[in-house]
């Protein structure tokens, strides 16, 4: 088969792919690991949900595989080095969610900067026009947010470890580059949207957070692993951070006995920032077109270096249902 679609996909995108490639649509297939492995062994490309990890062992059992598409979610659980070594391309459409994430962060900022009606002692709120907002990570969503904030009269600071302070991008975006510590020292509010790499784990910890401006509010759509949870909890419980909204927190870090359990001023959501119909559709189209291009350019042969003995995949069984209805959106948890 050309393409295995193992997660819900919008009907119009699915139809477009079906007219161009031999496609099998089985959004519930990952629930059966054995059958999923059998199907993957026959696919030249696959669209995978975010909860399915990819490592060298998975790739070794998929000798025909040339591309992995991910419509929602990041690539945190994909071994990119293994994919590169095996000649398998990982395809995403990261800018598709930029408008949705910018709107989400703006709404979170407005909420956190206004008085909490449930607080025992109501503190007067703030207007964004008189605030300085720091952006940690300058992805497409952050750049879009910067434009909206500037229209409101907000001063915007920025930090991105992959971008030099002398880069011409900063002036084009209208964002003042500063060091990470300076950003936290100077900002009334901070938005974090930095992608997670191993070198960034715990980046926002005891070297940065204790220097935050008193009364600062924090919004993050980045993985929780960027934070030292104990330090973040200390800053919230002490009142140094007035409030935080984290959009990437699974139940685990909030469980009893964990540092963030019951932390003062903490709001969490299960990765809702990009969970809009429009963002999902943009991403699906972006990934579909990239997969189409890869399938056109690559031969339907076993990859060089694929595991010996895996060249003859088992016969595809009738549990795959090409005609199954496409879903309009995946659940937030699939991000």
Image (cartoon, rainbow, N blue to C red):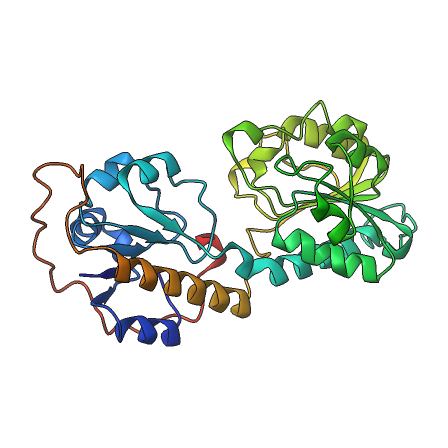
Residue at 82%, 62% (x, y): give it: 151
Asked whether residue 5 appears in the rendered view, the answer is no
Please tell me which residue is depicted at 38% across the width and 60% down the height of the picture.
290
Picture quadrant of residue 266: top right
**Which x, y percent locates residue 112?**
78, 51
Residue 72 in percent (x, y) is at: 46, 56
Above-or-below relation of 289 to 36? below
Q: Nearer the viewer, residue 78 or 262?
A: 78
**Residue found 84% across the figure and 61% down from its top:** 152
Q: Residue furthest top?
A: 207
* Residue 247 appearing in the image: yes
Horizontal side, residue 70 vs residue 20: left or right:
right
Q: Is residue 17 above or below residue 68?
A: below
Q: Position of residue 90 (x, y in %)?
A: 37, 48
The location of residue 183, given as percent across then percent down, is: 78, 36
Total tally of numbered discs in the picture: 0
| Figure quadrant of the N terminus | bottom left
Q: Is residue 333 left or right of residue 173?
A: left
| Depth order, front residue of 267/166 | 166
Q: Is residue 318 left or right of residue 150?
A: left
**Image-based side of 205 in relation to 316, left or right:** right
Asked whether 145 or 213 is in front, the reply is 145
Q: Is residue 179 above or below residue 217?
A: above
Residue at 54% x, 38% y is: 196
Q: Nearer the viewer, residue 150 or 124?
A: 150
């Amino acid at each position: 088969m050309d393409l295995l679609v193992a997660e819900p996909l919008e009907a119009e995108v699915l139809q477009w792919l079906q007219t161009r490639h031999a496609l099998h649509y089985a959004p519930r297939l990952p629930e059966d690991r054995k059958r999923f492995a059998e199907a993957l062994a026959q696919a030249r490309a696959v669209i995978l949900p975010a909860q399915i990890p990819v490592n060298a062992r998975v790739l070794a059992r998929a000798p025909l595989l040339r591309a992995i598409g991910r419509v929602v979610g990041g690539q945190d659980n994909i071994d990119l080095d293994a994919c590169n070594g095996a000649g398998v391309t990982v395809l995403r459409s990261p800018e598709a969610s930029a408008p949705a994430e910018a709107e989400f962060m703006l709404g979170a900022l407005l909420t956190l900067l206004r008085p909490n009606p449930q607080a025992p002692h109501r503190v007067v709120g703030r207007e964004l026009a008189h605030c300085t907002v720091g952006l940690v990570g300058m992805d497409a969503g952050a750049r879009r947010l910067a434009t909206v904030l500037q229209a409101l009269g907000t001063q915007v600071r920025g930090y991105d470890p992959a971008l030099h302070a002398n880069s011409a991008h900063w002036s084009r975006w209208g964002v003042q580059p500063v060091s990470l510590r300076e950003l936290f020292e100077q900002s009334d509010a901070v938005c974090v949207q930095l992608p997670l790499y191993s070198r960034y784990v715990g980046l926002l910890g005891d070297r940065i957070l204790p220097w935050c401006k008193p009364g600062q509010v924090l919004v993050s759509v980045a993985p929780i692993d960027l934070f030292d949870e104990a330090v973040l909890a200390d800053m919230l419980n002490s009142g140094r951070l007035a409030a935080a909204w984290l959009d990437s927190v699974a139940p685990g870090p909030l469980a009893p006995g964990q540092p963030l359990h019951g932390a003062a001023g903490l709001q969490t959501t299960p990765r809702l920032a990009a969970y809009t119909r429009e963002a999902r559709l943009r991403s699906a189209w972006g990934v579909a077109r990239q997969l189409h291009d890869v399938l056109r350019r690559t031969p339907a042969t076993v990859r060089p270096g694929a595991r010996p003995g895996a060249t003859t995949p088992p016969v595809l069984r009738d549990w795959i249902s090409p005609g199954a209805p496409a879903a309009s959106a995946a659940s937030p948890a699939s991000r």
